Image (tube, rainbow, N blue to C red):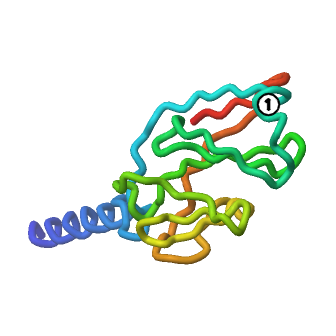
């Protein structure tokens, strides 16, 4: 009787361990170091030169800099320039000279396309660029995390 109780207890412990422990598939790739982001930009001053479909680099913001993408008149997306395959490199992704909105890692060759959520298009990277929150408050675009 005591032996059955131990086997039943062991089975329950193993079952709960399997159900409530993180699985290998939950790995989201290399961790991009957290940096506090709070960037207010004036829509009609700081962003007046940005047309729809264009980008603007904010080099001293985020971890390796931020790229701001204007999808529509009042629709903006902000991404960190850190490659998600090799965040420890000293350089961030750079914009392709031939294609607006396409960024490439000079270290691993991964390319990211901003119009599809900054997901990788080619190369070894599997995860999109880190996205920051954007909101419009009056005539200010606010980028935060």
* Residue at left offset 43%, top offset 71%: 108
Quadrant housing residue 66: top right
Please state the horizontal and vertical placement of residue 20, each as a whole percent of the image: 37, 58
* Residue 134 visible in rendering: yes
Foreground residue among 94 and 25: 94
Please state the horizontal and vertical placement of residue 142, each as a whole percent of the image: 70, 30
**Identity of the residue furthest to the left in this view:** 2
Foreground residue among 134 and 97: 97
Q: How many marks?
A: 1
Asked if residue 83 lies left or right of residue 23, the reply is right
Asked if residue 97 lies left or right of residue 128, the reply is right
Foreground residue among 127 and 57: 57
Q: Residues within 10 Å of mark 1 (few under 14, many from 20)?
A: some
Quadrant housing residue 38: top right
Please state the horizontal and vertical placement of residue 49, each as a whole percent of the image: 82, 39
Residue beneath disc 1: 136
* Residue at left offset 14%, top offset 66%: 6
Viewport quadrant of the C terminus? top right
Viewport quadrant of the N terminus? bottom left
Asked if residue 130 lies left or right of residue 29, the reply is right
Foreground residue among 1 and 61: 61
Q: In the image, is residue 80 above or below residue 145? A: below
Q: In the image, is residue 41 above or below residue 6? A: above
Please state the horizontal and vertical placement of residue 74, each as a whole percent of the image: 86, 40
Asked if residue 38 lies left or right of residue 13, the reply is right
**Identity of the residue furthest to the front in this view:** 97
**Identity of the residue furthest to the right in this view:** 73
* Residue at left offset 43%, top offset 40%: 34
* Residue at left offset 46%, top offset 75%: 124
């Amino acid at each position: 009787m005591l032996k059955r109780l131990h086997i039943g207890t062991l089975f329950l412990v193993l079952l709960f361990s399997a159900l409530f422990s993180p699985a290998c598939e939950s790995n989201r790739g290399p961790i991009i170091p957290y940096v506090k982001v709070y960037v207010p930009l004036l829509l009609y001053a700081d962003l007046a030169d940005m047309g729809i479909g264009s980008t603007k680099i904010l080099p001293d913001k985020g971890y390796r800099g931020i790229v701001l993408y204007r999808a529509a008149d009042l629709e903006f997306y902000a991404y960190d320039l850190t490659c998600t395959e090799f965040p420890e490199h000293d350089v961030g992704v750079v914009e392709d000279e031939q294609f607006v909105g396409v960024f490439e890692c000079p270290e691993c060759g991964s390319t990211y396309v901003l119009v599809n959520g900054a997901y990788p298009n080619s190369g070894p990277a599997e995860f999109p660029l880190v996205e920051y929150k954007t909101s419009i408050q009056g005539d200010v675009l606010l980028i935060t995390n």
